[in-house]
Image (cartoon, coloured by chain):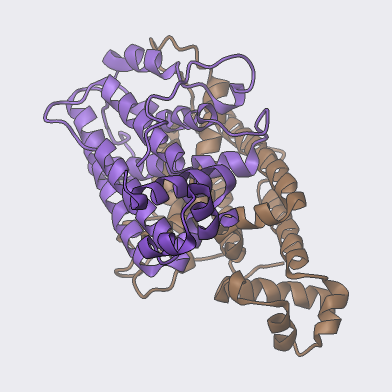
Chain colours: A brown, B purple
């Protein structure tokens, strides 16, 4: 691993563990036993490190959201959700202060907006593929007369899933007393329960049982804190 | 209006218009043509002002979410959504940097967590009342076998509505290029379209037409920016 890669990886770990506000580039340099000048040679500022971490995060999420050359299965949908929550966990400092980072860096703001747009497109494609597999079905409310097409419904659905998933960590941090005080990936993945609930009404009869069986691994966040959970991380250790 | 009330109201206006980061207590004092010492007599810090604005915001939202002594109508549901988005708009600076304020003020963090909990309880009651009126119906997926009760479903639904509503402004700010560059209450209220979509699958046949008719006033955010919208603010001017 190059020095540059070590700086990036250790910065991410320290930001996640201690909060980005409390970590300076000097802390990172000291932690890696390199000189501040050596760090400065690779990254001119903390903002430059954050920007590069963001690009890694974006690439990881876009990698997770790729569609295979075949119809999607129920398991695929769960793998998507599980992967995205692993990604959110690995880069969790980003979403705690997202709007601050975007405000501070116009280039990041532009790229994040484009990233969101691409992710929403991808989510729509995933939903459409699940529909083609017969797992989801979209019948605009008969008699509703509002002319909402199935396409519009899928777009709205994709955005609601995105809003719930990307804001789940902040909700837990701001509003939930976590037993033991430390947020874990178990808590994080309870967000999958919330995301699944948005899609649940559209699951077809034929696949309802399979969806429910896989969903039972992701309990409501209110049930966490007592006993053990079946939630385990498959990719939480993967980082840059 | 007392000097204390004028300080609070003008601070809110300035925070909303120019961003809280760019406004000091000296700016507020100068704007009101009072001395910094006079402002300091009422509020020892900007944090104290923010805290008091938060308590007003919380009281306003809880006032909006009160349940009447009768079954709810479809119009009531729309009034709830419309009111809450008016409240979010009137205090919009709060949700741009919410996590920063909560981090900076432990008292606020505790109270905000309790406020969220009360709001979620209220949302569940509203959903249950709409169910009693026959507007919504919850039938856990037949054959799903996951034992999810209708009560658990309503809880999860209430939280998803909360996540979408409270994070809507941040989504628009971070990810959407708003035509003209300035976010308006028209954009803000396009979030109602998103919130309604979460409940839509549970609307009963008997009320589908009425819901769709009222919903047509709240278009998808992607359709904004061209032409005029029917969205108007009823309470946007109301503040403290």
**Left or right of A67, for residue B192:** left
Instruction: Point out the image quarter for the N terminus of chain B.
Output: top left
Looking at the image, residue B197 lies above or below residue A177: above
Q: Position of residue A70 (x, y in %)?
A: 68, 37
Residue B196 visible in the displayed image:
yes
Q: Position of residue B147 (x, y in %)?
A: 27, 46
Front-most of residues A85 and A21: A21
Q: Position of residue B92 (x, y in %)?
A: 48, 43
Number of numbered tags placed on the structure image: 0
Instruction: Point out the image quarter for the C terminus of chain B.
Output: top left
What residue is at 55 percent from the left and 36 percent from the top?
A158
Front-most of residues A186 and B11: B11
Looking at the image, residue B152 lies above or below residue A189: above
Quarter of the view holding residue A19: bottom right
Looking at the image, residue A39 lies above or below residue B157: below
What residue is at 35 percent from the left and 12 percent from the top?
B209
* Residue found at the far bottom of this picture: A33
Residue A210 visible in the displayed image:
no
**Left or right of B125, for residue A160:** right
Q: Position of residue A113 (x, y in %)?
A: 69, 43
Front-most of residues B88 and B161: B88
Looking at the image, residue A68 lies above or below residue A204: below
* Residue found at the far left of this picture: B69
What residue is at 23 percent from the left and 28 percent from the top?
B130
**Left or right of B68, for residue A204:** right
């Amino acid at each position: 691993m190059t020095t540059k890669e070590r700086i990036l990886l250790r910065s991410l770990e320290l930001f996640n563990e201690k909060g980005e506000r409390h970590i300076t580039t000097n802390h990172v340099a000291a932690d890696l036993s390199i000189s501040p000048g050596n760090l400065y040679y690779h990254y001119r500022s903390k903002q430059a490190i954050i920007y590069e971490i963001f690009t890694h995060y974006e690439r990881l999420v876009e990698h997770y959201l790729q569609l295979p050359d075949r119809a999607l299965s129920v398991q695929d949908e769960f793998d998507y959700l599980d992967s995205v929550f692993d990604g959110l966990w690995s880069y969790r400092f980003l979403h705690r202060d997202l709007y601050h980072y975007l405000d501070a860096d116009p280039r990041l703001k532009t790229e994040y907006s484009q990233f969101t747009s691409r992710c929403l497109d991808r989510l729509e494609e995933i939903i459409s593929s699940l529909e083609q597999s017969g797992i989801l079905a979209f019948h605009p409310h008969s008699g509703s007369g509002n002319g909402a097409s199935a396409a519009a419904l899928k777009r709205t659905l994709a955005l609601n899933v995105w809003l719930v998933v990307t804001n789940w960590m902040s909700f837990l941090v701001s509003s939930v007393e976590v037993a033991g005080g430390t947020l874990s990936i178990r808590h994080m993945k309870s967000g999958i329960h919330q995301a699944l609930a948005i899609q649940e009404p559209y699951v077809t009869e034929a696949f309802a049982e399979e969806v429910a069986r896989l969903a039972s691994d992701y309990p409501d966040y209110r049930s966490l804190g007592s006993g053990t959970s079946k939630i385990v991380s498959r990719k939480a250790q993967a980082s840059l």
